[in-house]
């Protein structure tokens, strides 16, 4: 008899065949505890959708976005569809350009909950593929942040407030549903998916684990902005960001470890 899944992983796909394939295969390759994988396709209507339809081990939801629905809202709505169908203890949001790179990653991350029902979320902030010393230098020379804190500039929309990002984030499912929290909260105000949800968890007294990027990066790798960059006809991205992302994509996708996963078609079975 199959073991009962402990967690539900939800990945949103939008026209990212190569990234989604790598994301899913890396999950299959490195996950050691039973879990359900939900992939919500936001009406890609391309080769990525066809690929997902062939996978028998995932639960595919083919979502039809509302006419004129913006990408950020579509992403949040897709995560919410996954959460609505989640019946496991933990719900894990992941981006399709996030790849697992460590054996036992999921059990390790669940371990941070330490069996404490008051811990509602485990995650991290931005994950940047730069050396740690450069990250420290970037933080140390961030004059705008320093001035904002020194002058106590008002932040009514919590634009600069920390939150665990949906890049790879674990939540207690029962807490989100009991508190009636949604990934769509404040999306009409332009707030990123999951941001208001996280603030509500904190403001309602739940504990959250904020892992340093250096720790989360042991488990997963994230190609920031990759979905937008590979779909330039639909998303506007600054040229500097595009160049930076393209360099990282070429570097990561050509690495031996990634090529080994991409060449192992058995991971689709």
Image (spheres, rainbow, N blue to C red):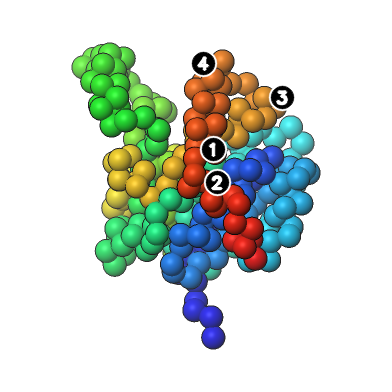
In the image, taking residue 13 as reference, residue 238 lies left or right, namely left
Residue drawn at the location 29% of the way across and 24% of the way down = 134
Determine which residue is flagged by label 3: 233
Task: Give the Cα separation between the discs numbered 2 and 4.
Answer: 27 Å
Residue drawn at the location 54% of the way across and 39% of the way down = 253
Q: Are marks 1 and 2 in contact (CB under 8 Å)?
A: yes
Under circle 3, the secondary element is loop
Instruction: Rate crowding at label 3 as few (under 14), some (14 to 19) or many (20 or more) other CA atoms within 10 Å.
Output: few
**Mark sitting earlier along the chain (1/3):** 3
In this view, the mark in front (2 or 4)? 2
Instruction: Rate crowding at label 1 as few (under 14), some (14 to 19) or many (20 or more) other CA atoms within 10 Å.
Output: few
Q: Which of the labelled discs sits on residue 240, or is there none?
A: 4
Determine which residue is flagged by label 1: 254
**Mark sitting earlier along the chain (3/2):** 3
Task: Give the Cα separation between the discs numbered 3 and 2.
Answer: 28 Å
**Mark sitting earlier along the chain (1/4):** 4
Task: Give the Cα separation between the discs numbered 3 and 4.
Answer: 17 Å
């Amino acid at each position: 008899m199959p073991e009962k899944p402990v967690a539900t992983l939800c990945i949103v796909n939008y026209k990212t065949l190569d990234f989604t394939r790598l994301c899913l295969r890396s999950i299959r390759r490195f996950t050691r505890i039973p879990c359900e994988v939900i992939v919500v396709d936001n009406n890609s209507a391309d080769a990525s959708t066809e690929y997902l339809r062939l996978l028998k081990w995932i639960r595919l939801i083919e979502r039809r976005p509302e006419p004129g629905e913006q990408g950020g809202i579509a992403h949040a709505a897709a995560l919410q569809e996954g959460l609505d169908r989640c019946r496991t203890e933990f719900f894990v949001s992941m981006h399709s350009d996030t790849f697992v790179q460590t054996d036992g990653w999921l059990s390790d991350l669940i371990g941070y909950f330490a069996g404490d029902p008051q811990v509602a979320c485990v995650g991290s902030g931005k994950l940047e593929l730069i050396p740690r010393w450069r990250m420290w230098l970037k933080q140390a020379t961030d004059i705008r942040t320093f001035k904002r804190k020194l002058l106590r500039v008002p932040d009514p929309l919590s634009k600069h407030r920390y939150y665990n990002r949906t890049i790879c984030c674990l939540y207690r499912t029962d807490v989100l549903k009991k508190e009636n929290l949604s990934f769509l909260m404040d999306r009409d105000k332009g707030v990123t998916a999951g941001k208001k949800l996280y603030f509500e968890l904190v403001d309602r007294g739940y504990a959250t684990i904020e892992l340093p990027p250096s720790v989360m990066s042991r488990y997963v790798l994230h190609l920031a902005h990759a979905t937008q960059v590979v779909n330039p006809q639909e998303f506007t991205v600054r040229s500097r960001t595009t160049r930076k992302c393209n360099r990282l994509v070429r570097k990561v996708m050509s690495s031996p470890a990634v090529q080994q996963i991409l060449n192992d078609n058995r991971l689709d079975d």
